[in-house]
Image (cartoon, grey):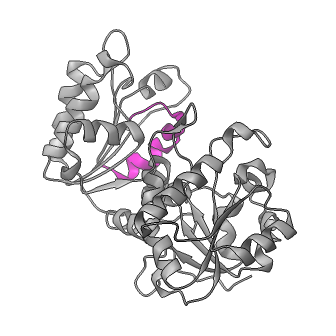
């Protein structure tokens, strides 16, 4: 096991272990964010792949062979409907556009435990793409023995999957056992959020449907001046499942049908947003997928982008609303994941570098 640096994060002064400092002619393991939205065999958004293209290009330019790995969805055992084959083909197509043709030899490997397949794939290709890691129980158990065959050929690990940097999955904590670096996209996201840690006059806006956001309420109320809660979350608070005691937390009362913010909620939220120097927003304010439940999200989006504060957002619906309103250029930074953003905001550190 490699000696651990006591520094909490990869962006601390003097400890920026960017992929830029990697040497030539290595076989590297690249953990990417491959969990793309897919519907009926069609990829709806490939931006998570595109953000890692600069890291891949840099590695290839330096004559490194790359073993790409990640996960898709939440499969039970080897659910072939959640195979990463479609993501692999999309990544290669993107790379060919950037390179202007069939520029890299590549192969898809369907079993990370098959030593012979791994060996042959690495010998004959520049990019080796591994099947969904969540097909194996070891991944979510945090058991790095999953990579025993792969580690026979590579001693370098690179993480460019910031969206899952808060999880203790085997592919995230593998840095503890190998010479490790961080991809260009990962470093940028960590640095952007790092800039607002321990800052004053912070407002957090929480929405969406994922109830795990509510587990952060207590810690967020200690960090932020105000925590504004909308989306589908107020109903969960109302159910009594989550206790809210801090006066810094404002829970939306919602309109009568419960599908969106009420006009009074919008007024209250805007009032607080206007005062903020830093705004962190994760999750739509209503049932954004319904046409008659988008007003709250759009009004809060406008209020945030009109603010003079520093603005960071995360989440699919959050980003979609900003793009739909043509306000993307008024956001300082769009983070790849809401959970990781909140974890880092609270703890200042993540399993991806601890």
Q: Is residue 214 above or below residue 196?
A: above
Q: Which residues are magenta?
A: 206-224
Q: Residue at x 57, y 30 (%)?
A: 40
Residue 175, compared with residue 189, is above or below; it is below
Query: Where does the image place residue 30, in percent across and percent down from the top left?
Result: 60, 69
At x 30% / y 15%, what residue is drawn?
292
| Dominant secondary-structure state across the stretch colored magenta | helix
Q: Quadrant of the C terminus?
A: bottom right
Q: Quadrant location of the N terminus?
A: bottom right
Please tell me which residue lies in front, 30 or 234.
30
The one of 147 and 124 positioned closer to us in this rendering: 124
Image label count: 0
Q: Is residue 242 magenta?
A: no
* 48 shown above or below 152: above
Percent position of residue 209, x then y: 47, 30
The x, y position of residue 177, in whole percent, is: 72, 77
Q: Is residue 260 visible?
A: yes
Measuring from the top left, give residue 170's x and y in whole percent. 71, 61
Residue at the spot x=33%, y=30% of the render?
A: 285
Residue 224 drawn above or below residue 98: above
Give the quadrant of residue 323.
top left
Furthest residue in direction top, as rendered: 256
Residues 150 and 307: in front is 150
Query: Residue at (20%, 19%) from the top-left corner?
Result: 263
Q: Is residue 353 visible?
A: no
Q: Name the side, left or right, on which 125 lies relative to 349.
A: right
Residue 126, image quadrant: bottom right
Left or right of residue 142: residue 69: left
Q: Residue furthest front?
A: 101
> Does the magenta run of residues contain 213?
yes
């Amino acid at each position: 096991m490699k000696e651990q640096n006591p520094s909490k994060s990869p962006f601390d002064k003097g400890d920026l272990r960017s992929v830029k400092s990697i040497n030539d002619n290595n076989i590297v393991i690249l953990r990417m964010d491959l969990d793309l939205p897919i519907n009926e065999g069609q990829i709806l958004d490939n931006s998570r792949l595109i953000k890692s293209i600069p890291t891949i290009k840099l590695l290839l330019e330096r004559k490194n062979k790359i073993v790409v790995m990640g996960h898709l969805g939440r499969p039970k055992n080897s659910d072939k409907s959640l195979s990463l084959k479609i993501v692999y083909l999309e990544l290669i197509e993107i790379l060919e556009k950037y390179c202007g043709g069939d520029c890299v030899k590549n192969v898809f490997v369907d079993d990370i435990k098959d030593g012979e397949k791994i060996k042959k794939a690495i010998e004959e290709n520049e990019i080796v793409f591994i099947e969904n890691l969540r097909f194996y129980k070891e991944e979510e158990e945090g058991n790095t023995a999953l990579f025993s065959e792969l580690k026979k050929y590579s001693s370098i690990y690179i993480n460019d999957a910031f969206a899952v940097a808060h999880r203790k999955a085997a592919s995230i904590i593998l840095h503890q056992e190998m010479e490790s670096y961080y991809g260009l996209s990962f470093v940028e996201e960590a640095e952007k959020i790092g800039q607002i840690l321990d800052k004053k006059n912070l407002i957090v806006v929480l929405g969406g449907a994922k109830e795990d956001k509510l587990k952060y309420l207590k810690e967020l109320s200690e960090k932020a001046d105000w925590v504004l809660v909308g989306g589908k979350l107020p109903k969960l608070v109302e159910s009594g499942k989550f206790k809210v005691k801090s006066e810094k937390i404002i829970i939306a009362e919602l309109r009568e049908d419960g599908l969106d913010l009420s006009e009074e909620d919008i007024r209250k939220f805007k009032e607080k947003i206007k005062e903020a120097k830093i705004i962190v927003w994760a999750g739509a304010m209503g049932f954004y997928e319904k046409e008659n439940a988008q007003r709250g999200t759009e009004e809060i989006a406008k209020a945030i982008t009109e603010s003079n504060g520093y603005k960071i957002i995360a989440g699919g619906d959050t980003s979609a609303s900003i793009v739909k309103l043509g306000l993307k250029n008024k956001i300082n930074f769009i983070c790849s994941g809401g959970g990781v953003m909140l974890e880092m905001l609270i703890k200042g550190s993540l399993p991806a570098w601890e």
